[in-house]
């Protein structure tokens, strides 16, 4: 049984649906505030998004060919709005490098407590 998504999650999903080169996955289908996308051209690249941060949005850029963290995250960001979250997601999944993703307006890099551990 699928859980319905929250309003901010649905808005972010709508912003990303029209982007070229990515597709939504079912990895986050059971969460009210989570969605996951994968690159069509770079299948090792995924993004996990959580909109339940008191107005902020957590965006984890994942590269499944790198296993330095338990979830293959190569960077984690806090986005202040849907536009920033969708922009960094599209950039990563369309093949841009981490430097380009880090330069997205409206983001701050997040240092997760589990980063760098397995």
Image: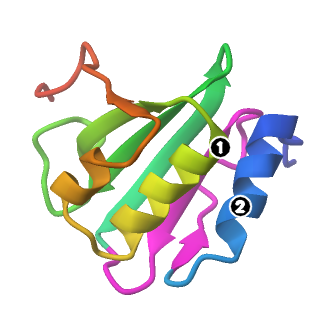
In the figure, is residue 9 to the left or right of 64?
Answer: right
Q: Residue at x 87, y 37 (%)?
A: 7
Residue 21, percent from left and from top = 49, 83
Residue 75 visible from this viewpoint: yes
Queried whether the magenta region covers residue 79, the answer comes back as no
Residue 95, percent from left and from top = 29, 75
Q: Residues within 10 Å of mark 1 (few under 14, many from 20)?
A: many
Quadrant of residue 16 within the rendered picture: bottom right
Q: What label does residue 111 carry, if any?
A: none
> Please, is residue 97 above or below residue 83 in the view?
below
Q: Residue at x 18, y 36 (%)?
A: 69
> Please, is residue 83 above or below residue 94 in the view?
above
- Helix, strand or loop at mark 2: helix
Residue 6 visible from this viewpoint: no
Queried whether the magenta region covers residue 35, the answer comes back as yes
Find the distance from the CA under tag 2 to the CA under tag 1. Answer: 8 Å
Residue 82, percent from left and from top = 65, 43
Residue 96, percent from left and from top = 26, 70
Going by the picture, which residue comes out furthest to the front? 105
Q: Residue at x 47, y 36 (%)?
A: 106
Q: Quadrant of the C terminus?
A: top left
> Please, is residue 77 above or below residue 93 in the view?
above
Where is mark 1, residue-wise?
82
Residues rendered magenta in the picture: 22-43
Where is mark 2, residue-wise?
15
Q: Residue at x 62, y 36 (%)?
A: 81
- Pick the residue in front: 33 or 54: 54
> Please, is residue 17 above or below residue 78 in the view?
below
Is the residue under label 1 in contact with that under label 2 (CB below 8 Å)? yes
- Pick the residue in front: 20 or 40: 20
Q: Earlier in the sequence, mark 2 or mark 1?
A: 2
In the figure, is residue 101 to the left or right of 57?
Answer: left
């Amino acid at each position: 049984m699928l859980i319905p998504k929250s309003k901010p999650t649905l808005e972010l999903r709508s912003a990303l649906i029209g982007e070229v080169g990515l597709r939504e996955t079912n990895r986050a289908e059971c969460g009210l505030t989570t969605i996951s996308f994968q690159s069509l051209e770079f299948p090792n690249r995924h993004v996990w998004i959580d909109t339940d941060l008191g107005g902020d949005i957590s965006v984890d850029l994942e590269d499944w060919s790198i296993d330095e963290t338990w979830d293959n995250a190569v960077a984690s960001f806090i986005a202040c709005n849907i536009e920033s979250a969708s922009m960094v997601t599209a950039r990563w999944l369309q093949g841009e490098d981490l430097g380009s993703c880090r330069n997205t307006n409206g983001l701050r890099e997040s240092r997760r407590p589990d980063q760098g551990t397995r």
